[in-house]
């Protein structure tokens, strides 16, 4: 039997042997301001834990570029498209692959988009699939983000979650999957503003 250590998937949360404490968003910001964490470091705040961001592989990067390019072609200046940047919620500061927020751009000169600003979040999922379908889904539904996309590179589909429910067991009430032969509707603030062919997103 091999004695080599098994590589632990990101989705398997490791419980420290000693008690640890969670950080608030304010404390997380103070760590950055003090230089303990540097802006742009590969970390984000999820459920109070400062966690390393997943390594980005070429297919993941390609899908993010494809999606961002098509959204930029379709959307007016009334909307702000943010790529792999932070959004600030009361108890989390994730850095989604794509965020669409209510404009104008000048609104975010000194602050990140917040829960009330964000109308759509998209995560491209390969090695992060379990986390995107569980942990991030819970975070985004708790923040009541109206629409959440998981661009599932493994199953080659886009999972669209809507009708968020917060409370003790946050989740989305509705899910619809779109395959490579379908067109993905872009619904912002309850209004369809365009559509993208799913095959154009998938690398």
Image: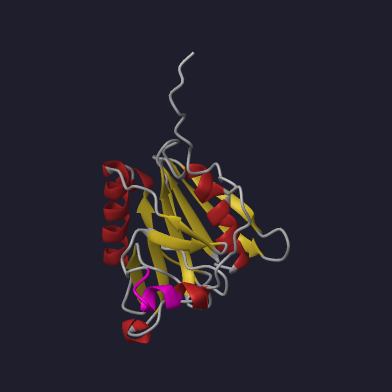
Residue 35 covered by magenta stretch: yes
Image quadrant containing the C terminus? top left
Q: Position of residue 146 (x, y in %)?
A: 55, 66
Q: Position of residue 77 (x, y in %)?
A: 31, 78
Q: Is residue 162 left or right of residue 53?
A: right
Most common SS among magenta residues: helix
Picture quadrant of residue 163: bottom right
Picture quadrant of residue 139: bottom right
Question: Is residue 192 something that shows in the picture?
Answer: yes
Which is more toward the observer, 52 or 109? 52
Picture quadrant of residue 181: top left
Q: Position of residue 140 (x, y in %)?
A: 55, 62
Q: Is residue 142 left or right of residue 2?
A: right
- The residue drawn where x is 55% and y is 41% is 12
Residue 33 covered by magenta stretch: yes
Q: Position of residue 8 (x, y in %)?
A: 48, 36
- The residue drawn where x is 36% and y is 54% is 196
Count of picture labels: 0
Q: Residue furthest front?
A: 18
Q: Residue furthest right?
A: 168
Which is more toward the observer, 111 or 79? 111
Task: Check the image and report above or below for 161 versus 181.
Answer: below
Q: Which residues are magenta?
A: 29-36
Q: How is the image coloured?
A: secondary structure
Question: Is residue 203 something that shows in the picture?
Answer: no
- The residue drawn where x is 44% and y is 33% is 7
Q: Residue furthest top?
A: 1
């Amino acid at each position: 039997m091999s004695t080599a250590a098994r590589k632990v998937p990101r989705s398997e949360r490791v419980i420290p042997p000693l008690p640890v404490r969670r950080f608030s968003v304010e404390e997380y910001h103070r760590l950055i301001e003090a230089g303990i964490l540097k802006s742009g470091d590969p970390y984000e705040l999820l459920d109070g834990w400062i966690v390393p961001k997943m390594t980005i592989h070429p297919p993941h990067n390609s899908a993010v570029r494809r999606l961002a390019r098509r959204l930029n072609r379709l959307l007016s200046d009334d909307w702000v498209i943010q790529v792999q940047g932070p959004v600030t919620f009361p108890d989390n500061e994730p850095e989604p692959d794509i965020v669409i927020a209510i404009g104008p751009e000048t609104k975010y000169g000194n602050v990140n988009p917040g829960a009330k600003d964000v109308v759509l979040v998209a995560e491209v999922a390969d090695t992060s699939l379990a986390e995107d379908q569980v942990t991030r889904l819970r975070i985004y539904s708790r923040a009541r983000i109206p629409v959440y996309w998981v661009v599932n590179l493994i199953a080659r589909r886009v999972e669209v979650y809507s009708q968020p429910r917060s409370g003790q067991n946050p989740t989305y009430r509705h899910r619809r999957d779109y395959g490579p032969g379908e067109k993905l509707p872009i619904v912002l603030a309850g209004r369809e503003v365009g559509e993208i062919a799913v095959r154009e997103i998938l690398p």
